[in-house]
Each structure stands twice: as structure tokens, then as C-alpha cells.
Amino acid sequence: MQTNLLCKETNAKSIKMSDEIDHPQLCLWLKAVSENRNKQAFTHLFNFFAPKIIRIARSKFPNEAQANEVVQETMSNVWRKAHLFNQDKGAATTWVYTVMRNVTFDMLRKVKANKEDNLSDDIWPIAEGLVSDDDAYEDHLETENLKAVIDNLPESQREVVKGFYFMEMTQEQLAEKLNLPLGTIKSRLRLALAKLKVKLGENHD
Amino acid sequence: MKDIIKSSSKAIKIPIFPLAIFLLPEGKVRLRIFEAKYLKMISIASNGQGFVIKLPKDSQKNSSATWGSLVKTEDFNQGEDGILEVDVKCLSLVKINDVSMNSDGLQFCNTKVFPHWSQQQYSQHQVAEHLADMLAGIMSEDTMLKHLYSRQLTQDPAWIVARWLELLPVSLAIKSSFVGNQDFNQAKNFVESIIHK
Amino acid sequence: MIKHHPTFELLQSFVNGDLPASLSAGIAIHADMCQECQRQISQLTDQIAEANFEFEANFLDRFIIDEEKDLDEIATIDFDDMIAGITASDEIEVLKEKEDKFISFNDTNYKLPDALHNMVLGKPAQIGKLSRSRIQLDEDEIHSSLLHIKPGGGVPEHTHKGFELTLLLDGSFEDEQGTYVKGDFIMLNSEHQHHPVSEHGCLCYTVANDALHFTKGINKLLNPIGSFIY
């Protein structure tokens, strides 16, 4: 039944499928940290995230010490708050990103407005997680029963059940078709979108 | 097509099928219909006026009015799991007005057809050749696309750009902007900046 | 039904953490009342998170990296030390149960949106049918307030130099463009002129980055009131 090459994936999902990040592994490590306070698992998480967090923080803070503080704070929140991560609500990358973004936001406020009010967790709650990625246009999912059945299906089958066969290609499929690396496709999409955004902005004015 | 414009001008309300897919004129998709009210919708729609596929509101932000894709049923089948499968083709884009709901929870609306760049003729040299070739390649390899479009592959530049827009992995909100203020050339440039060797 | 939403660009900056606290809170409050925006935010967060943590790290809008320089810098931090420091304590963060907070205007208690829980609210000041409590965020030229309009009250016709966000927390109001309801996220820029009136009363969260300029009659004389209201 699901033999189509072009199974519909949402943008978010197709990115989530990226082969560059081993999402199940990240989830397992977070779980091990949360349930067993497993230092080995934390070290793996640290080695995966810390270098990237440093790069990102360096783009936001001119000062190296501040960038290091972002890493320190983010990773120690990961250690202390891992039990608040709920893998049903989203990917591990999304959760760690939220933790990092919140740390960065509060630190920037401290630097710019000299305020230590730590507002970020009120604005972007990390405990509740984000709304589940329920793409279905609610109308089709009125009964809780149907919803439960669909949620238990493998992701690739959900869209088919929800109402249609295929819609767009995933980034992976596009890369394969064009015989180009996935990274190239992603860059092109971002560039094309960036250009488009400029145009949209112009038209709005 | 003419029947439909006639019937909507007589203000016959057309049922709405809310679905997060982007479909331009001549675009096709296979739907699976299993809810009672939408099965009913299909039977109403088969009287000739078709139905309207409408995107979620948040993906229509880049366009000024609420619009939808007016579709007609081209084929239908019982799927292997017993679910009704309906192949539809988009006839035109319509502005959606006066939405009301009947007792089954089915929405109906008045529609006004509006022209879209994808329905105009452009000379063939206006679009890069490889867009057509690659699209034909993809469509011949994919079982479903092959089935839907087998007899209708064209070299028409607008058709090719429109199909690419439907297929590309970008958000519905972005796609919707090509119904709003973006013209054929902007759409073509967008697709070409992604699809090239 | 909510008809006015933040733009896609605004949602994107929100997810990136690039907006000031005042606007971030406005979007968070709106998203609490608007499933569609909430869903879009959650998708955007997935995408941006993924893009941030990809190995290639070529997230264009963000940074251009100089590989070698970067590697050098990373090497200057002792990861092992940091890991040991962090894991030395087994304490976990215990989540405090959130207690609802309320604010009272005109003898009515309103539940304070979660995003404003830890913000410092000034004492409400009143002129006629308008009461306003400033929110102390210290964001320079950006002013945030809770604005309460009693039934029949309104804000004099005005324009302003910067932007003006009005987020309806409760009740409704009307202006030249139509009626606005709870949850509506109304962002105006300097080209707009408007004159909101609330027949039944309302409570708004407002963010403006410039004093308002009144354009009509006697209100012109009252121009200083502009900075008072928003």
C-alpha cells in the first residue's frame, strides 16, 4: 500500500528524518541520564552538543567567556532537567535547542538590560515541551479513537491514513533524484527561501 | 469547467474538504475518504459542482483572501483496506466566501473563480529544459504520479513550474505565497534556484 | 474567532530567540490561545533545532565559520573538566507547581498569562475609562503595558512612529477595520492610524516602541497622554 516513492512528509518531519543526526540514540542517552544519572551517556550528549553550542553562542556573544557560559549552563540544565524531556512531544534536538535558546535569551537580557529576571522558561516552557506534532488538520481527527489508532502507526503511514497519498517529496528524495548530497539540497532550499523572504517583505510594504 | 462556473454563479454552495495540501490548477492527488461526512461530500460533489480543498488558515498568511483549490473527481476506487480512494484534479483556484456548516458538520461556501499564472501560456524557452526532463523522470519512476499523470505530461512551462511547486519540500505557507502576489517568473526562478545540476 | 496572527517572520524570530522579551511574551500568549500558531511554532522549532545541530552546521542565516580558528577555540575549553563539574552533583531540578496569578482592574480579577508571571508590574494608573499598568522590562524605547478599557471607553485616534502591538487578553474592541476578539494579535506600524473603542470593555497586553501621536482636535493638545497609554 505504501509503495509510493513520494510519501507525504511535512517539512518538519522530513528534516527530522535527517540521516546526519541519530535521533533515537540521542533519546536513549537522555533517558539514561534521566533515569540512571548515567555519566557515560551524558558525556556522549556533551560531545555531540557542546561543540555546536559553542559555535552558535559565539555568533551571539562577542565574548568568549560568555559563549563558554552558555555551554556550561545549557549542558548543566540538560543534566539536571533531563527528566523533563518527553520524547513523545518532540525530538531530543528540539528539547536541547529550547534549553540552549532559553539560556541564551536570559543571558542576553542580563548583558543588555542588566536584568536577571530569567523570563525565558515562562515564555518557552521546557517542561510541557512543545505541542505534539499533530499535523492533521483537526477536522479529520474528530474522534479520539481515530486519533489513537493513527498515533500508533509508523510515521510513514500516518499521512496516508489521514487523507491523501502523497504530496511533496522529502529533502532526501529530492537529493536522491538530483543525485546531489543532502547538504547541497538543504543549502539551496535555504538560499531560495531567503531570497523569497526578501521579496515577500518588499511586497508587503 | 464551464459547468462549474455556471453552477457557482447560481450561488450553489460547494462543500469544503479541509486538507493541508497545495494543489494548483491541473494538479492531481489521490485522496482517501473514510469519514461519513466526507463520504457524503463526495456524493454531493459528484452532482457536478466538485468540491474545494482548503488549506489550514496559518498556511494562507501570504495571500490576501481565503482561497481553495476547486477539484473534480477523475477516478475512484476501493483501496485494499476497503477505504474509498478518489483521484481528483484541480480545475481552478477559487476565493472562498460565506462559509456555513450543515448539520453533519460539513462546511459549504460560495466560490469565485480567479485566474492564476499557472493557467496562462508562456513560450517554452522561458523555462529551463532540465526542469521538464527531471519532472518527467520523477513522474515516470513513481507509481502514483505515473498513474495520475500518465496521459497528461506536457511541455507547458507553467504546468511544469506548478507541478514542481507542489512537489518541493517547502512549507505550505511558502507555497501559498505563489498564489498571492508572486507571479510566474518569481515561481520559475524559485524552482530553478533549487532544481539545477 | 481569532483573526489576527503574528507574521511568519515574527514567529521565526521568536523561535530563534531574537525578539525582545516584550514581543516574545506577546507571541507566547497568543500561541497559548491559538492552536495554529502553536503548531507552526513547534514545527519551526523542530526545523531550527535540527539545522542548528547538524554536523555541517551550515545554517546560513546564523554564522559563517572559520573551521581552523573554531577548532582552536574549542580546544581551549576543557570538556572533561566541564563534564566532571556538571555531573558532580546528582541534584535534579524539581518543578514547582505553577500557581495562577491574578491582576485586578475595575473590580474584576483577570488571570495573568503565564509568560508574564515573573515580570514586575507597576501600580495601575487611571484616566477616565482607561487604566494602565506598566510592565518593567527595561527595554529602552520599547514600552509594555497591561491596558484595561472600561465599557464604552476608547483610545483617542493616534498614529505612532514605531510599531504598536495590541494583544487582546479578554473582551473585545472595535476600530475602523473591524472587531477584535480575545487572542487577536494586532501589529500596527507607523502607517496605520486607528481609534479603538471597546463597547463592552477589554484587557489588552500592549507593546509599543514609540510615543503615540494624536492627530485630532483637542487630543492634539493632550499629546503627552500618548506615552501614558501604550
Image (cartoon, coloured by chain):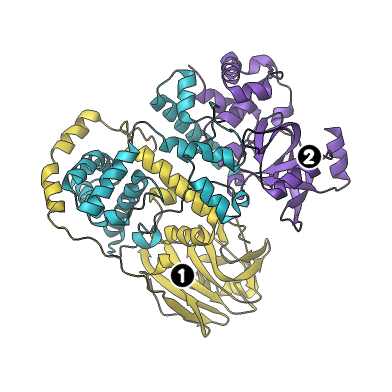
Label 2 resides on the chain identified as: B
Q: Please state which of residues C83 and B47 is positioned toward the viewer in this rendering.
A: B47
Image chain in purple:
B
Type of the residue with mark 1: Ser
Q: Which residue is mark 2?
A: B50
State which quadrant residue C63 falls in: top left
Where residue A32 sits in the image (x, y, percent)? 24, 48
Type of the residue with mark 2: Gly
**Callout 1 crowding tier (Cα within 10 Å): few <14, some 14–19, many ≥20:** many
Query: Would residue B114 be found to the left or right of residue B6 on screen?
Result: left
Hue used for the chain lettered A: cyan
Where residue A128 sits in the image (x, y, percent)? 39, 59
SS at mark 2 in the image:
loop
Where residue A110 sits in the image (x, y, percent)? 27, 59
Query: Would residue B66 be found to the left or right of residue A103 on screen?
Result: right
Cβ atoms under marks 1 and 2 closer than 8 Å: no
Quadrant where the N terminus of chain C lies? bottom right
Can I make out residue A202 in this image? Answer: no
State which quadrant residue A83 falls in: bottom left
Hue used for the chain lettered C: yellow
